[in-house]
Image: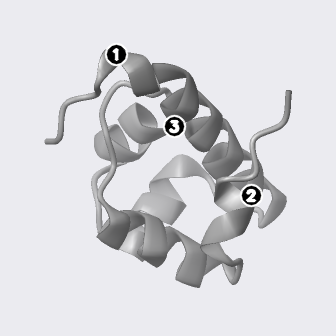
């Protein structure tokens, strides 16, 4: 797994929150969504809780599966 850089932790937290928001908005549990995108539930949980970095391949797969553009996941609110 990719390690988080300390200066990006807040961005990873916001990304994880956005992923969880859109996943739930689409009615998926973590287990269901992890299966859809081909990762473990543990990895999904770690991504959403900013405990690990996430590759662009996984981000793009998440976006495709949720039918949203990547920019939506990176729209961080204050």
Q: Is residue 42 left or right of residue 77?
A: left
**Residue 4 higher or lower than 69, as above or below:** above
**Residue 66 higher or lower than 27, as above or below:** below
* Pointer 2 residue: 22
The nearer-to-camera label among 2 and 1 is: 1
Q: Is residue 57 or residue 23 the one in the foreground?
A: 57
* Viewport quadrant of the N terminus: top left
Q: Residue at x 17, y 41 (%)?
A: 2
Q: Which mark is residue 48?
A: 3
* Pointer 1 residue: 6
Which element type, helix, strand or loop, lies under badge 2? helix
Q: Is residue 29 or residue 6 the one in the foreground?
A: 6
Dot 1, how many residues are within 10 Å of its Cα: few (below 14), some (14-19), or many (20+)? few
x and y percentages locating residue 14 in the rendered image: 64, 34
Tell me which numbered mark, 2 or 1, is placed earlier along the sequence. 1
Tell me which numbered mark, 2 or 3, is placed earlier along the sequence. 2
Q: Is residue 50 left or right of residue 4?
A: right
Q: Residue at x 42, y 60 (%)?
A: 34
Q: CA distance from mark 1 to mark 3?
A: 17 Å
The nearer-to-camera label among 1 and 3 is: 1
Q: Residue at x 75, y 41 (%)?
A: 76
Q: Is residue 3 left or right of residue 54?
A: left
x and y percentages locating residue 42 in the rendered image: 31, 38
Which element type, helix, strand or loop, lies under badge 3? helix
CB under 8 Å between callouts 1 and 3? no
Tell me which numbered mark, 1 or 3, is placed earlier along the sequence. 1
């Amino acid at each position: 797994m990719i390690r988080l850089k300390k200066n990006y932790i807040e961005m990873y937290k916001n990304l994880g929150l956005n992923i969880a928001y859109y996943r739930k908005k689409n009615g998926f549990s973590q287990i269901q969504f992890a299966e859809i995108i081909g990762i473990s539930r543990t990895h999904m949980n770690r991504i959403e809780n900013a405990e690990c970095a996430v590759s662009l391949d996984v981000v793009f797969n998440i976006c495709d599966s949720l039918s949203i553009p990547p920019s939506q996941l990176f729209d961080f609110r204050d």
